[in-house]
């Protein structure tokens, strides 16, 4: 079981006029459940919270630790344990084809190019994407790109998977396919989402509003609280 802990972790950024603006208030929370959703309106601070979990952002105050590793001083070790999937897969997929992208992810694991290519092909087959191996990333549908981005992150077998709005660009069919893929994963999963059905697949959910966690509990209760906030 992973131990994810924020202890007084807050984030402030400098504005154009030189003042500080708080985008995440000092937050103390432990995240140990297998499936955790983070829900809230745009600009509420939920993406900031997620980006703290793999050193994409560093706290301005307090600490964030992943299995005892401090994100501020041990960022490289943290990123080996935490896989991050972005909202837009095109911001994550940097090579021309899915096969090449996964090969890039595996460069530390397999030093030999033939071994790396074979392993990458195996990853694509494992996630039902083998037929897309040589396709251009730009020829794939939004759902296919998101699944390739997920496979690229999972190729290195992270202990924790963090997803920022993974279903935002997907139609209903691909959203359902993504839900089934995520449900089958052994990794701990923490995700920000506007998809309340996807949120309710989780055990626990945090509701974030104005840079603070305003509710933390069972996912169904969190979704009900969120609906009441904006009804």
Image: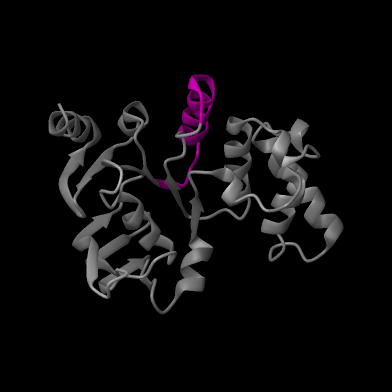
Quadrant in the picture for the C terminus = top left
Residue 166 placement, left or right of 98: left
Q: Main secondary structure of the magenta part?
A: helix
How far across and down, in percent of the image, does residue 100 sit? 76, 50
Note whether 142 is above or below 109 in the view shown: above
Quadrant in the picture for the N terminus = bottom left
How far across and down, in percent of the image, does residue 190 sit? 37, 47
Residue at figure coordinates x 59%, y 32% from the top left = 142
Residue 101 placement, left or right of 2: right
Residue 103 placement, left or right of 215: right
For the record, the magenta segment spans 170-189
Residue 187: tell me if it is visible: yes
Q: Nearer the viewer, residue 77 or 224?
A: 224
Q: Is residue 199 magenta?
A: no
How far across and down, in percent of the image, does residue 94 sit? 67, 53
Residue 154: tell me if it is visible: no
Q: Is residue 186 magenta?
A: yes
Hey, which quadrant is residue 199 in on the image?
top left
Total labels: the figure holds: 0
């Amino acid at each position: 079981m992973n131990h994810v802990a924020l202890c007084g972790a807050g984030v402030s950024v400098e504005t154009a006029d030189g003042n500080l603006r708080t985008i995440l208030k000092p937050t103390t929370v432990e995240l140990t459940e297998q499936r955790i959703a983070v829900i809230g309106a745009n600009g509420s601070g939920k993406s900031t919270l997620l980006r703290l979990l793999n050193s994409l952002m560093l706290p301005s105050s307090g600490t964030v630790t992943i299995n005892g590793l401090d994100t501020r001083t041990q960022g490289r070790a943290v990123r080996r344990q935490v896989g991050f999937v972005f909202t837009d897969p095109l911001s994550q997929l940097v090579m021309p084809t899915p096969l090449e992208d996964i090969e890039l992810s595996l460069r530390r694991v397999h030093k030999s190019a033939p071994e790396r290519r074979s392993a990458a092909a195996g990853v694509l087959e494992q996630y039902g994407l083998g037929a897309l191996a040589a396709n251009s990333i730009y020829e794939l549908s939004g759902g296919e790109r998101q699944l390739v981005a997920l496979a690229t992150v999972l190729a290195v077998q992270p202990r924790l998977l963090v997803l920022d709005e993974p279903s935002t660009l997907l139609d209903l069919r691909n959203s359902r396919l993504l839900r089934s893929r995520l449900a089958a994963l052994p990794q701990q999963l923490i995700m920000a989402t506007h998809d309340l059905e996807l949120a309710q697949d989780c055990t626990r959910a945090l509701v974030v509003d104005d840079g603070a966690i305003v509710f933390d509990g069972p996912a169904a209760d969190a979704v009900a609280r969120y609906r009441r906030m904006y009804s």
